[in-house]
Image: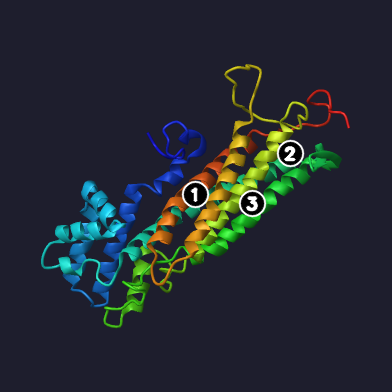
Amino acid sequence: MTFSAFDHPILGALVGDAEAAKCFSFEADLAAMLAFESALAGAQAALGLIPAEAGRRIGESCRDFAPDARRLADGVARDGVVVPALVAMLREAVGEPHAAFVHRGATSQDVMDSSLTIRLKPVCALMESRLAALIETLRRLAARDGNIPLMARTRMQRALPIAAADKLRAWRKPLERSLVRLAELKPRLLVVQFGGPVGARGDLDGKGEAVAAELARRLDLRAAPCWHVERDNLAEFAAWLGLVAGSLGKLGQDVALMAQNEIGEVRLAGGGGSSAMAHKSNPVAAEILVALARFSAGQLGTHFQALVHENERSGAAWTLEWLTLPPMVAATAAALRHAATICHGLRFIGPGAAGPKASG
């Protein structure tokens, strides 16, 4: 049993996305957190803040470390975050005399936020790849079917004639703008988090800024000031996810309407069957785009409440991000996948090709 449709063994095939889900798995999160601890020790050893042998030992331990999942779960229930229990077990694995150098100058939020941005890199790459491919598919559709005449409908009523190219342009242009937006956002989003207990990068002999820069280099992230309570870049990414899902929802809504028997302006390569009416071919993928768009819009409103971080750290607002961002990523990734399926099998139909026309 699962609480979420996104990772449900059956419903997940409809609304989930296995490739995006990998980036939010426990295994991916653990690997990223250990990468942070290894890179932190390496950076501090390179800057002379901890012994070189301690840096090597911590790095080796992180590569081979397999924590007790039960202890981690108990630690989360107690501490609200996984890092205290993780660091305690990692120190046991490192052993004396180097255990004290594990996690020096860092705080739980540094580890967890940096883990998130590490994992958002492949998420962004996945979104970019699917978005670019979908845009190209829509361009090919316009080249093939763009001159086919359609009837424009305003406020659900017949208006004036247009061409399929006009409909396709309205689907494609928002996606092209979203691709540009993501390229502009990534330098702000994919940054290291390192601030220490209160964001001041203290307890590092005045080398906090240098540690942050070297840590970012080793993790292949951009260096940035501490952003413990500055959540606008994550909120902007959530808004980007909502924009893409919403744009695809418009595409899905149009396709579902145009595929109606009474209108018949598009033909879909495949459709869903009915348990009661064998003659039906339901526009399942198009309907799912609408549902995912509406879901994402609702989640976005909740996610934006995580912008309200009190003082120098918020347990409540931070936790809210964990509840909203992963399903928004799943919804948008699934929407891009379904949209690709729709558009690859979509064919516009000229007047009279689909049977009797509806009366004016």
Q: Residue type at mark 2: give it.
A: Arg
Q: Mark 2 points at which residue?
A: 144
Category of crowding for the residue at label 1, using alpha-carbon neighbours closer than 10 angstroms: few (below 14), some (14–19), many (at least 20):
many
Q: Which of marks 3 and 2 is nearer the N terminus?
A: 2
Q: Distance between the residues labelled 3 and 1?
A: 16 Å
Q: Mark 3 points at which residue?
A: 175
Q: In this view, does 356 lie to the left or right of 227?
A: right
Q: Name the residue under label 1.
A: 329
Mark 2 secondary-structure assignment: helix
Viewer-nearest of discs 3 and 1: 1
Question: Total label count?
Answer: 3
Q: Residue type at mark 3: give it.
A: Leu
Considering only vertical position in the picture, is 137 above or below 234? above
Residue at 50% in and 64% down: 233
Q: Earlier in the sequence, mark 3 or mark 1?
A: 3
Residue at the far bottom: name it: 206
* Residue 300 x/y as whole percent: 54, 54
* Residue 246 x/y as whole percent: 62, 48
Q: Residue type at mark 1: give it.
A: Val
Quarter placement of the C terminus: top right
Viewer-nearest of discs 3 and 2: 3
* Residue 239 x/y as whole percent: 56, 57
Residue at 80% in and 37% down: 148
